[in-house]
Amino acid sequence: MNTGSPRTTNGFLFADLRDYTGYVESHGDQAAATLLEAYRSLVRSAVGEFGGAEIKTEGDSFYVVFPSASSAVQCGLAILAAAADSAEREGPPIRVGIGVHAGETAETSEGYVGSAVNIAARVCSQARAGELVVTDTVRALTRTFLPVRFVDRRSRRLKGIAEAVVIYRVEAVTDGTARTAAAGSASGIPRKLRVAVLLLGLLVGGAAAGYVLLAAQRPPNGTTTPTATAPPVAATFPDDGESDLLAQVPADIRNRCVRAPEAEALAGTSASLHCDLEFGAEADTVWYHRFRTVQDMGNYLSSVQVAQHLQLGTCDADTPRAQGTWQVGTTLSGQLFCFKSEGSTWIVWTYAADRILARATRNGDTAADWAGLYGWWKLARLFVGPPG
């Protein structure tokens, strides 16, 4: 019989201030100390309210254990609510990201020991400022108990964790409806199936190439899009066409790419890749599509223009809906579309010389969502991966 330390199941919460180091550099030590004091005060208040025990605090990071997953989730939401309230008063905004996991651990004189603690810490690193992110384990334990909604079901490879972990963002529900909506709605706005595009980098060699495109968007009533025809399915990934396309994908996200499912392939393409970006990235997913001909790529763009009723213009920080062109220097250029649809924000661009089209999307359709996605794209369009 095992006579080692008794094992218990608990909820584990990690919380970190986002960009605290940058705040120190831009505002000075005294202002940073004031921000840290306010942050620690509101976290400890919530921890006490929901019966948590503060295990470790270093700088702007908290490690807290709770007797249940539900109390950890409730505490996380309370911290975010208090941080949001603080933004309405005088003082610096408290930008905190929170991760929660639940599992069995051993309690020792040094604290709790087990993979559940490690996973909770890694999950926290996936949360944007103002987000509470939890694992599928937490969702399963709390989905029928708490008045919350779970969105953005994503399978993630976390540093130091052998198996992929499914992650959700948690949002409080005030009307008692729609408690769970994995891949469903965000902030009460129905969404479609999550798709999107590229992270740091699209590519090209020579005259610039473009990227990712996901084909899962439903056009408005009365419009149609070309029937998706998937490239021949190869027994193994990647096949020759996918290998060529992968060689042009930024090196730091190649291991995030898989063959795009048949439903996401576009008519006229020879290879399609689906790449999920890091959870906290300003864009969510990337599809890379290489078209057989420039005409095939043009046909797809025409279908998007018609479905979204886009007018000629220039996508910029203040213009989230337009169709036009983009150019950087003498080699990087192509067409550029931007729009919002069904609660998500989109940007689509091409590198015509390489017959590559890219489309990026971000869940949410607020001005902040567009600002985040557009800022990300301005960098992403510049990164190109040399083939081979």
Image: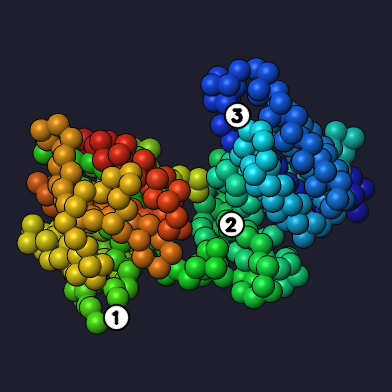
- Tell which of 225 and 314 is nearer to you: 314
Q: Amino acid at mark 1?
A: Asn
Pointer 1 residue: 221
Q: Is residue 75 left or right of residue 207?
A: right
Q: Judging from the image, what secondary structure is the residue with disc 2 in?
A: strand
Q: Using the numbered discs, state the Cα–Cα distance from disc 2 to disc 1 in whole angstroms.
A: 30 Å
Specify the quadrant that holds the C terminus. top left
User: Where residue 335 sits: x, y (%)?
Assistant: 16, 51
Residue at x 30% of width, y 39% of height:
378
- First in sequence, mark 1 or 3: give its number: 3
- Confirm whether residue 232 shows in the render: no
Disc 2: CA contacts within 10 A as few (<14), some (14-19) or many (>=20): many
Q: Amino acid at mark 2?
A: Arg
Q: Using the numbered discs, state the Cα–Cα distance from disc 1 to disc 3 in whole angstroms.
A: 46 Å
Q: Amino acid at mark 3?
A: Tyr
Residue lying furthest bottom: 222
Pointer 2 residue: 169
Residue at x 87% of width, y 39% of height:
108
Pointer 3 residue: 20
